Image: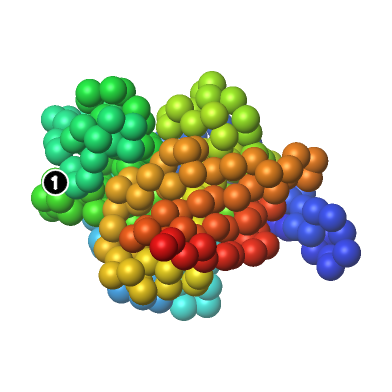
Amino acid sequence: MSRSDVSGDDENALECTECLDPADAFALVGNETRLAILEALWAADDGPVSFSELRREVGMRDSAQFNYHLQKLTGHFVIQRSDGYAFKHAGEKVVRSVIAGSFNEHPSLEPFPVEGTCFACEGPLQAVYEDERLSIECPDCGHGHGEYAFPPGGLNDRTREEIADAFDQRVRHLHCLAADGVCPECSGRMGTHVVETDEDCCLGAAVRVDHECVQCGHTLCSAAGLRLLDHSAVVSFHRERGISLDERPYWTLPWCVSDEHTEVRERDPYRLAVCIPLAGDELRVTMNGDLDVLETRVERGD
Ligand SMILES: [Zn+2]
Ligand SMILES: [Zn+2]
């Protein structure tokens, strides 16, 4: 793949002149020997792997045939350096996808109870795993408390409690990236929009925030409060009242999963307020439509 037109002021700074068609890319790795080469590179310790070592690992006697397959990968998935062969990002992604299990595992996991209660009816919550997505749901009233893709590889070697914990971390990090404008799938530019309708939303929230990637179309939705989980004023407001936010799953915090704590103060441009009650006091956080925090204020109760 050759890239050109790298310039600072060009709107599209990196233009790909000989990009591979996706179907051709899949065809290139749709071969056992080539996958074995990528897996051998993965298994090798850091640094490039020589031709002969790679061939030995893959276990192919015919040097010419091995070279044919290796050359097919070279350029797009693998790069040839003076001291051997190494991954390009796309090659590493292929192996990671195989490891994540998306292509070859169909695990089933019965719904299991998780910490916390439903923000709407205070019933118990459960984690449901379906179609490689994990969601936190209330079986009593049906309210969702967030869902996200969770590759089957994430279920390996984990107890149910650890799966729930890993899911919590994953949701926090992916939403954090998205709110910072970086697509968690492709690193493309992500836009943030305030949406006022409860259609197409896993939370059933009438006021929510959608992040959408302009490059690959990946979308995430959340309550506006989810953005605040690592904001310093929000963290210290909780810490001063005995709660460590990084030890609480996000779904146990109603302002992260429901719109009840979100007020639309102004439209065009948007101005939102998230009100977080705790121990008789209330923290009011004002944000703009991009979820930048404009102001925080603690109202003390009597
Ligand atoms: Zn409920
Ligand atoms: Zn994307």
The residue where tag 1 is placed is: 160
Q: Nearer the viewer, residue 221 or 260?
A: 260
In the displayed orientation, state which residue is furthest to the front: 302
Asked which secondary structure carries label 1, the reply is helix
Q: Is residue 36 visible?
A: no
Task: Please determine whether, in this image, residue 114 is positioned above or below residue 250.
Answer: above
Q: Position of residue 243 (x, y in %)?
A: 30, 66
Residue 224 seen from this side: yes
* Residue 154 at x, y percent in the picture: 25, 48
Quadrant of res 20: top right
Q: How is the image coloured?
A: rainbow
Q: Looking at the picture, how far across and down is residue 187, in whole percent?
A: 58, 54
Residue plotted at (25% across, 35% down): 122
The residue under the point 28% across, 70% down is: 242
Of residue 162 and residue 246, the one placed in the foreground of this image is: 246
Q: Amino acid at mark 1?
A: Arg
| Numbered-mark total | 1
**Residue at position x 60%, y 50% in the image:** 273
Give the left or right position of residue 1, taking residue 41 as reference.
Answer: right
Q: In the rendered view, does 67 fall on the left or right side of 115?
A: right
> How far across and how far down the image is residue 270, in percent?
72, 44
Q: Quadrant of the C terminus?
A: bottom left
**Looking at this view, is 288 or 36 the one in front?**
288
Q: Is residue 28 above or below residue 106?
A: below
Q: Residue at x 55, y 37 (%)?
A: 208
Task: Please identify the residue farthest to the right as the structure is shown.
Answer: 9
Is 169 on the left-hand or right-hand side of 28?
left
Quarter assignment of residue 19: top right
24, above or below 243, in the image:
above
